[in-house]
Image (cartoon, rainbow, N blue to C red):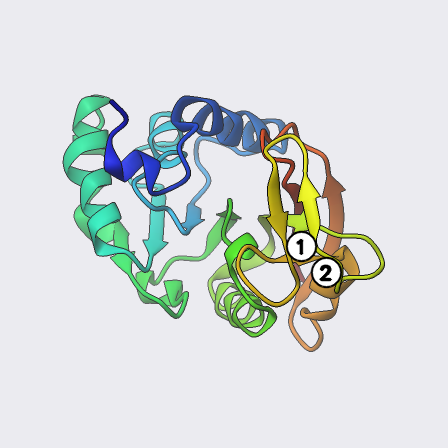
Amino acid sequence: MAEPHRERVGGLWEELGRLQIEFLRSAGLRETDALLDVGCGSLRGGVHFVRFLQAGRYYGIDKDAELIRAGLEIELPRAGLADRVDADHLIVTDSFDASRFGVAFDIAWAQSVFTHLPAPDIRRCLEQTARCVRAGGRFFATFFECGEDAGVAVTHEPGGITTRHDRDPYHYRFRDLAALCAGLPWRAAYVGEWAHPRAQRMARFDRE
């Protein structure tokens, strides 16, 4: 039987966990990088990041304290990684305030976060993340992509998830995400397909 903390982050535990680390490694993630996992949940990707990175280089934020607790108390010990992440490297916040860590991050990562956020909250995420990603660093974020008419509901295959512009799960045109960077030290770039099993696309934000 699937465990609740795994299902609450969308299931596909092994497949999406491996996909995240494979993508970031192909994008140049180094063992020495400081990584911020935005919306880390119960560490579906986090377990893989922690195993790859040097001890102490992984940090995560999420609004759900129960999921973070499950990651710390269940997933990390199960993977033999309990001694590689201090509890204060995972914080509960609903405002994306990762500057509390006092770390200049090399990479920030948000898998299945923008897909659940309206545009003002994505803007807040970009603002807050810009405060703690170093110049030259990068922020990768997945999103559901729509056509030119954002007002039309879209069913994405594979996965069969239907998205809309005005309620969760949300979809966006890439140019809408790029526009949310106005006045911020981000330069948006379209990555697109990355083999996501539910057809989410990838955007990259380069810190100026």
Find out whether the residues at labels 2 and 1 contact each other: C-beta distance under 8 Å: yes
Quarter of the figure with residue 198? top right
What residue sits 34% from the left and 55% below the top?
62
For the residue pair 203 and 27, the one nearer the viewer reads as 203
Q: Which residue is under mark 1?
A: 206
Q: Which residue is under mark 2?
A: 187
> Above or below — where is 62 with respect to 79?
below
Q: What residue type is labelled 2?
A: Arg
Q: Where is residue 157 in the image (x, y as percent from the top left)?
A: 67, 33
Q: What element carries label 2?
A: strand
For the residue pair 190 and 156, the one nearer the viewer reads as 156
Q: What residue type is labelled 1?
A: Asp
For the C terminus, the quadrant is bottom right
Q: Where is residue 195 in the image (x, y as percent from the top left)?
A: 65, 27
For the residue pair 175 and 77, the one nearer the viewer reads as 175
Binning the other alpha carbons within 10 Å of mark 2 as few (below 14), some (14 to 19) or many (20 upward) gives: some
> Above or below — where is 40 with respect to 188?
above
Left or right for 88, reference 201? left
For the N terminus, the quadrant is top left
